[in-house]
Amino acid sequence: MSATTETLRRLEEATGLTTGKGVKTNPDGIRCFLTDLKEIRFFTMNKDTEIDMKEVELNVLDPEKEPMTGDGQTAGGEKNGSVKLKVPEDEVTFTGLSKEELMRVAGTPGWVRTRWVLLVLFWLGWVGMLAGAIVIIVQAPRCKPIPEMNWWNEGSLYQISDLDAFSEGLEGVEAKLDEINKLKVKGLVLGPLHNVQADQPDTLNLKDFNPTRGNEKAFVAVMEKAHKKGISVVLDLTPNYLGAVPWFRTGDVDVDDVLEKVKVAAEYWLNLDVDGIKLPALTVATSSVDWSMLQAAVHGNRTNKKLLMGVVEGISAAEVSQLANTTGVDLVLSDLLSSRSGGVARIQAMDTLHSQQRNVAWGLGAAQKDQLSKLATTPGLIRLYQLLLFTMPGTPVFTYGDEIGLQAVGTASPKMVWDIENEPAEGSANDTAEAERKERVAVKKWFKSLSDQRVKERSLLYGDYYPLFSSASSLSFLRLWDQSDRYITAVNWGAAAETLSLKLAPTEGVELPEKATVKLSTDPEQLEVDSTVSLDQVTLGPGQGVLLQFPYTG
């Protein structure tokens, strides 16, 4: 046996390495794979050894290239049959301390003191965090409790008195509820729809529909669909809506008798899930001895709060306040905004009624069921009064078409215009008609942005009111609630530009900043949205309005 063969044998015995299958022995006794490789690596271990062999290298010459003499050297300077073996260093494995060793160490004075120090630090940190949290809670400003809100305080009301002009009767109203819902109104005021002949009290039937205005089945269908969309439905029960006076002439019938019929009808419709009733000439109705019976019928034992809404015309703000305080009516719609054209008188009316804002409704023409455009005769003024109504302290009431600035022609109810967003085919409309369509689209977009602000901003929804400025043709006021953003409305409906100097009377906890940010503007070219204005000089052009915003600062 050659020296090389003996070396390999000893290597196998010491390491447990095997060459596996497919090997042969060359003439000198060196085992190798039947390949042309010069270096062969073996990584197979015997199960009985724990030596982790990293690498075994065998450099072997082909038989043809071996020197003729046994003591010759290869071209690489290595002796024929030499083996390189790399043996890893011994690895040291940390096994840790035994249980007995740990117990002995844990009881030493050093470790005992360390544990006590860590325990004390933990509890000191915990107590410190608890004390800090208590201090933060105590020093934090108290949130003002949200006032009790009813559904009619949460957004605007939308009147549809002429259903045919609006959209071909009750079926048309049902079909247009998706469009109405986009306006984010909270309630529909429908009617009157009942059967009666003008100035003929003996024909009055408040539980039966006028055949020309629909039927009960269609009305219930409108209610059900509206309720699914979160819209409440109020029914107008004006007795003599086709005649000269709403409660008939005094000589023709006793108001008490008519009010009794209204009470019976109210119970009937409320049991069908109507959300409220609306009555005209509230001062006449409340003078009846049967008024309390009607009030009890509406506000009786019901799970959902029902609305008792009344309309008044030609009375002062103080009288409106008295009606809201003493009659038990839930919402009083007046014509104060229409009958008082001066900024001073309008601010005074708001000063009188703002504390009763959850019982007061505002409209421009709404008390008479007229469109807003009857008094606001230009697109700029339409936007201005929409801004004013949505930000005043109280419930805004609109008549159908106000959202697009629908203009009434003559005494008849104007026909509602739909699909204004659809652009006409090229060449099918003249310039005037196209300009009118685009203006209606712009007014509707403005209306929806205001309605959105009203619904989501607490300061506008139920915030406190503070007057800031008034003149013959302009006014400004502040709305704020607790720690929410504050809003300032400033409008000028006059024919000339005016500069408003906004001042707040000394009020504890309320201050005006020097500047505010423009949130909405009826004329973005003059007052750009997101720009800042100085509150001591707010210049408004003719028919211009602006909604300003500034944050709560603590």
Image: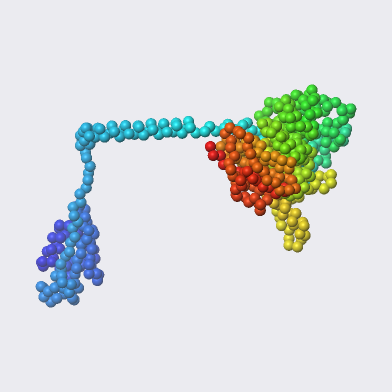
Q: Position of residue 524 (x, y in %)?
A: 66, 51
Which residue is farthest right? 251
Q: Residue at x 69, y 44 (%)?
A: 491
Could one spot residue 430 in this view of the protein? yes
Q: Is residue 402 left or right of residue 53?
A: right
* Quadrant of the drawing holding the N terminus: bottom left
Q: Nearer the viewer, residue 400 or 419?
A: 400
Q: Residue at x 76, y 26 (%)?
A: 294
Image quadrant in which you'd find residue 553: top right
Q: Is residue 221 left or right of residue 531?
A: right
409 vs 350: above or below: below
> What coloring was used for the rendering?
rainbow
Image quadrant in which you'd find residue 431: bottom right
Q: Position of residue 32 (x, y in %)?
A: 20, 67
Could one spot residue 219 in this view of the protein? no
Badge count: 0
Which residue is farthest top? 289
Q: Position of residue 547 (x, y in %)?
A: 64, 44
Q: Residue at x 86, y 36 (%)?
A: 243
Q: Is residue 529 left or right of residue 238?
A: left
Q: Residue at x 61, y 47 (%)?
A: 533
Q: Nearer the viewer, residue 524 or 189?
A: 524
Q: Nearer the viewer, residue 488 or 178?
A: 488
Q: Position of residue 448 (x, y in %)?
A: 67, 46
Q: Nearer the viewer, residue 246 or 528?
A: 528
